[in-house]
Structures are given as C-alpha cells and as structure tokens.
Image (tube, rainbow, N blue to C red):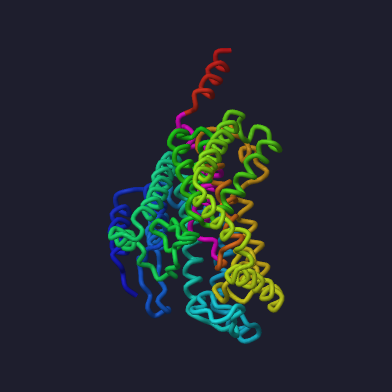
Amino acid sequence: MSLTLFGIIIVLVGALLLVRSGMAAMLAFVMVATLFGGSAAIALPALGGSTIPPANLALLFLILRAILPGPQQMERLGPALRANAFLIIFALYGIISAFIMPRLFAGTIAVTPLRPGAVRQLYEASPLHFSSQNITTAVYLMGTLIAGLGATIGAARPGSAPVIVRTGIIIAIAHAVLGFISILVAGTALDSIVEFFRNGNYAQLDQSIGGLNRMNGIWPEASGFAAYGGAWMIFMTELWLRDIERRRTGFAALLLALALLISTSSTAYVTLGGYSVILPLRMALLPGSVTLSKGLMLAAVTFVGALIVLAAITFNTAALERFGHIIAIMTVEKTESFSGMQRIYWALQGLDAFVATAGSGVGAGSFRSSSLITAIIGSMGVIGIVCFIGHLMRAFMPLRASTYAAQITGASAVGAAASWTALLMLMPAAVASPSPDPGVMWAVFSGLALGLRTHGSTAARSTIPIRPAARSRLKARYAS
C-alpha cells in the first residue's frame, strides 16, 4: 500500500481541517474530493492493483471529526446512527457477505468477475470464487457507510446548509468546465495535464465515437463523468426550483446540462431523458411542486436548446449525418452491439445468483453486473435489496409534504433537493452499475437529506436568507 501525490494532499488537508475546523467544513472537503473520480489516493498492489480514490481517504477524516470530542458532537451521533439504520445493515451485510458467501457457494454457479480482464467471448464466465474484488468492494461499502453517517452528522450542524449549497455550486461548475477542457485539449500536448489526474487503476477506454472526442473531464471514462455530473445537475436544478441561490444554481444546472448533452454518453442521455420526463409529471400530478414560472422557464430553455441544435445540424449536412450516427450508436444500436448484449447478460447474472443462493446472494464483489438493482439482488440477496430500498425511502421521505412543495425555505428546502437527487441519480446506475455499492455520492446526498430534514432543519432555517416573496407574506401576516 502506498500513498500517491493526491493521497498526500488529502492527508495534509484533512489533518489541517481536523484540528482547525468543524463538521461542515470537513463535509465540504469530502464533497470536493469526490470531484476527482479518476484519481487514486492509495495504490494497493497486493489487491490486484486496486486503488482507493481521494474521496474514500477523505472519509477517514470525516468520521474522525464526527467522533472526536466537540460541542454536542456525541449527541448527534446517536440520531445519525438511527437515521441510517437501514444503510448500516446494508453495508455490514455486504461486507460480511463479501468474505463468506463466495467461499460458501464456491463453484456452484459460473459468473463474470467484477474485473473480467480481457474478454475473449461474449458470455465469458468462471466458477464462483473469492477474489481481491470482494475485499475491494467491502472497502468501498465501508466508505459508503461512513459517507452516509458523516453527511448526516455534518448536515445536522447549525449553519451547514449554506456551506453545502456553496460547495455544491463550485463542484458543479468545476466538473462542467473540466469536461469542456477535456474536449478542447484532446489530442494535444495539453492533454497530458488532464491525464495527470487520471492515475487510478481503471479501464482507460477509447474516448471517441464517430470521430468525435467524448467528454470525460478528469474521469477515466465518459459514463462515470456523466453519472457524477448528472447527480449534481439534478441537485442544482432542485435548488433552483426552490429559489436557493437561484442565479448561481441555475447557471450551474444549465452548464452541466449542456455538458451532458454533448458528452455523447448514454448515461448522460438516460439522466437527461428521465429527468425531463419526471419534471413535467411532477407539475401535472403534484400541483405546487414546480411553480408555473419555473415550468415556463424550463420549457423555454429546452425549446431554445432544441432550436440551436436543429439549426446547427440543418445547415451542415455532414454534421447532421454524424449527429444521427452518434445518436444511433449510443441508443438504438447499443442493445444490438457486442457491448449491449454483454451488458444484458451481466444484468441477468444477478437474478441467476439470487435463485442459486435461495435469496442470500453470492457476496458483494463476486460478479459483474450492469444494473445496480440486479447487482444488489445477486450479491446481497433479500437483506440487501430490502435495506437499500428502506434507506432510499427514509432519505426521500415520500409521505412528507415538503418533499413535493416548492414554496419552502431554509435547510428543509436544501434537504428536499438532496432527497430528490438521492432518488433520481439512481436512474443511470439502474442500467449501468457493475457493483452493488451505490457509491459515496449517493450516501452523501441521502445523508444530507436525513441531516437537513430530520435533525438540522430548525437550527439551520435561520441561516438561509428568506426569499422576497416569503418575506412579504410574513410581513403581511404580522401586520394583520
């Protein structure tokens, strides 16, 4: 095990924040660290060359900050543990299953390993066995658990909501800008600067399609860039819908939407397509969830964007043909391709593993899937999928009116935005994730929702400026 340059930076900054700042700043530090999804903080040659990303290393300082003595520090730990009960069971069962189930069911089923290496045939599989990927996935699940607990505790601190919003805006804009830079410098000498950040041991795939460079920022591939950017686009949009820092969040959401649109990633199109369907449905079925003015602005932006794209490709026949070819490759032709058929096979492995183990799962990290849902079902069985859905529903809070109302302020509004993000960011993972680990970002957003809406809403409400319309209503009420 060895620290990389990024690992050294994380340790130095984390140690400084540990002694000089509180939970809110440490949480912001972890959020920023997630931006470096293609980087490695720790190299693990003994585990087949696996690497630990910067965010997972930063989580150690987050949990240390949470348990170290401080004002009301331990008082928040108990509520956070109760709020994340489903996540705790999910992660612990996943960690235990990663070490026990592959040995218990060894050889009873043939699966494609989580890291299959060079694929020689379409339906390549080998007998189930324990591997280094079981250990790696167990480590990642522990990181997901720590992220959820830390985010819940940090969000419950008074004054945390503005810090979370400002940090999110910076991350969203930075991620989009890095994506545009990765396209502009591709194939030039400056590309080595971007490659410097991609030191993680991940599959470095061909980042071009139809002769066009794909956008991946400092991430190893376009799908990872799009999944991360999609989550922040949803969060920024949900904040904008609630008039939280509306100019900055609106700009960040628009910039990310543009980046996703030109990223040529099917993951991006799943996010954009799914979200563009859900927003009108919310307006139609849940009056008050999206104000009329916001709905009209969204429609106008969509219309103008469509006009620009159509105008650009209409006056250039070659561009039109290339655009159509790229869209066809990334959508209708994808399921008929070698990769598409392989992904369907990987997804079905989860159902086969579930049946073969009578609902107990073959262990986290034992096989490769192409869907988070079937990965959890096949790896962690009934316990895993029930706890996953339970935690998701606890974070989303579907029975609360504040989940759907746009006219809310304070930390509750930020928490509601995080709730929607935790739910909707799973759209691409449901059709693309190879692992049962939902990831640090999902745990962070669900933790933010729990912390802000369950424990921190009252204390933090006064720290976010009240919108002008809400202020005038309050004045009229007290005047009467």
Quadrant of the image occupied by residue 479:
top right
Which residue occupies the foreground of this view, 366 or 322? 322
Where is residue 376? Give x, y as percent.
Answer: 61, 67
Where is residue 100? Give x, y as percent.
Answer: 57, 79
Against 69, residue 356 (above or below) is below
Against 266, residue 127 (above or below) is below
| Magenta region includes residue 444 | yes
Where is residue 125? Give x, y as percent.
Answer: 59, 81
Residue that appears at 60% across and 63% down: 334
Which residue occupies the foreground of this view, 370 or 192? 192
The quadrant of the picture occupied by the C terminus is top right
Which residue occupies the foreground of this view, 78 or 87? 87
Residue that appears at 40% across and 71% down: 201
- Judged left or right of residue 195, residue 446 is right
| Magenta region includes residue 296 | no
Q: Do we see residue 97 in this rendering?
A: no
Residue that appears at 50% across and 71% down: 138
Q: How many marks?
A: 0
Quadrant of the image occupied by residue 464:
top left
Q: Which residues are magenta?
A: 437-465
- Judged left or right of residue 192, residue 410 is right
List the single residue furthest toward the top: 480
